[in-house]
Image: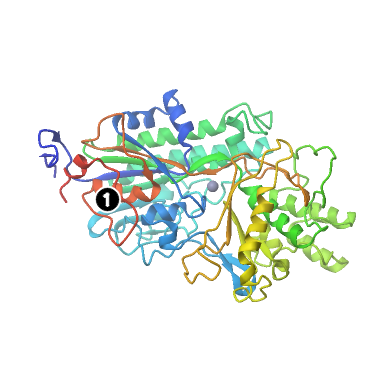
Amino acid sequence: MDIRIGSRSQPETEVLIVKRKVIAIGLDSAPRELLSEWMANGHLPNLKRLRGQGGWADLKGVPFGVAEASWTVLWTGCHARTHGYWSQLDYLPERYGAAWHYTYDYQEFPPFYALGPSRRVCAFDIPQVQLSDAVNGYQVLAYGAHSPQTARVSRPADLLDRVIEQHGDHPAILNDFARIWRADSLKSLHKRLVTGAERRGAICRDLLREDDWDLFLTVFGEVHSGGHHFWHLNQPDHPWYQYPASIKEDLMLDTARAVDRAVGTVLDAADENTAVVAFSQEGLAPNNLDIPSMAFLPELLYRMNFPGKTCLDGTASPTNAPVPPEIRFPISLGWTRDIWARRSDDSALRRVLRHALPMEMAQKVLRVIGDDPDGLDYPKNHDCYIQVPLWYSKFWPQMKAFALPSFGDGYVRLNLKGREPNGIVHPDDYDAVCDEVAEAILALRNPRTGRPLAADVIRPRSGPFEDDAKAHPADLGVLWHAEPADIAEHPRHGRIGPFPHRRSGGHNDHAFMIVRAPGIAPGSNLADGHTVDVSATILDLMGLPLTGNRDGRSLLPRHVTSSVVA
Ligand SMILES: [Zn+2]
């Protein structure tokens, strides 16, 4: 029922906020600055329309743990330090290893949209959550989300099957990867993403008609998947700009256009009294995460512990030799396998076998013919095989410091006496070793540009023996400069690489939110905030508080908040 009320803080202003219904559209990792440019240039007419009708807020994403903790921060309204979920992978100190964790358990802090029996909620394809008993309505997980980290399930149980039967499956679900050096692979991914976005738009339109939802929530993941693989096709300063040359189209912009059309379908289905929120949880940037965190960092720490030795291609000591050319076409089929094939080894036969055979088969054959016992080991937990830092785990007990697996920032763990089972760093030396490692990381340069790779090295923990299960496991966190690098050089430990780029797009903490609601001036700017504030803002539009000692706060102007009657 619509209610016409005036603002309590501005009684002379007539404000229409009524049924407190909200449609919230997540734009997974949408590039904030590019999005604004594309809207201004008319490429994204539906988002431009929404922005013109509402208010815009710049949001800051997670300062540490980008790409891993972002969604959980948004769904809980809590900073990662509050909920304690930092990554999809858990470090297991008792066995110097790691295991998949998947999503946060949402026990202490349920998702903000778990609003109990009094509110009808549809949560369609929300990444990195679990089904909640406190949602009165529909829940669909992993229809087509990027990195859903959950099983494909729904409540009601038959809803996901019904959606797929009516609209078709998302063609990129768990298949949103491409080999960025191959035109056919990029084009195929683009086609899957465009089709998926179209289907998601039609599904949302139909689900919106099925009930009088108090909150309708969905996330478009296609720009995230496309951004990882198509970034270099759009960005002239990327070293792989418009490579391969046979691709003439801007696949990244075209993916964003497909999402914009689907958003238009959702907007057209919304009535005028329904508030609309569009938001992102992080941004897109040149990929400065994959190679530095997964390859440069573990190799540097290995070389610091074992001077003169290398595990991956490069030089064990400084050199004045010309910088090798970029590797634009890997010698093996995929990026991980290519890095595996670039394992340091004096045996030409073993190198050829690693190039030619699938990783697991190569490992078996090499055990039979005799592998280099001093080399990297393929991780026994195959789920984590992509994580190059784990290939070094057999050395961790002998190392003072080693790199933890990461999909984002760089993480360094010290092998500390009294904490790790075979700790070798005395607690009295903790600060000195942290400083030594940080200094070495900060000395890394990209020899192609001469610029440093790391922008900062931080200490995420309050101390080595911090007794808080919610603390990040890393003793040091590495924030990399936003410049993609395929080769690293250290003044004492030589060159590491070159390696082919895995994905051209990465992440930064540039997020945003658009709010269209009665009382918010068209085209206005809201207060800047943090992604932790999105949930509180959505609930505020509905006249509800974010309860339970959470960190988020509403970014709505006070006269809008005060006009809502719960
Ligand atoms: Zn990503």
For label 1, the residue is 539
Secondary structure at numbered mark 1: helix
**Visible residue check, residue 386:** no
Instruction: Establish if 424 lies above or below 448.
Output: below
Q: Nearer the viewer, residue 50 or 80?
A: 80
Quarter in which the N terminus is drawn:
top left
Q: Residue furthest top?
A: 41
Q: Quadrant of residue 236?
A: top right
Q: Quadrant of residue 547?
A: bottom left
Instruction: Establish if 364 lies above or below 8.
Output: below
Q: Residue at x 66, y 42 (%)?
A: 452
Q: Residue at x 52, y 50 (%)?
A: 67
Residue type, numbered disc 1:
Leu
Q: Is residue 263 left or right of residue 351?
A: left
Q: Tell how many labels.
A: 1
Position of residue 436 measured from the top left corner of the image (x, y, whole percent):
67, 58
Q: Nearer the viewer, residue 97 or 443?
A: 443
Position of residue 566 measured from the top left corner of the image (x, y, whole percent):
16, 51
Q: Is residue 403 left or right of residue 54?
A: right
Position of residue 148 measured from the top left corner of the image (x, y, whole percent):
48, 54
**Visible residue check, residue 425:** yes
The structure's colour scheme is rainbow
Q: Residue at x 82, y 55 (%)?
A: 344
Position of residue 531 measured from the top left corner of the image (x, y, whole percent):
40, 47
For mark 1, does the 10 Å Cα neighbourhood hold few (<14), some (14 to 19), or many (20 or more) residues? many
Q: Is residue 506 left or right of residue 533?
A: right
Q: Residue at x 51, y 52 (%)?
A: 64
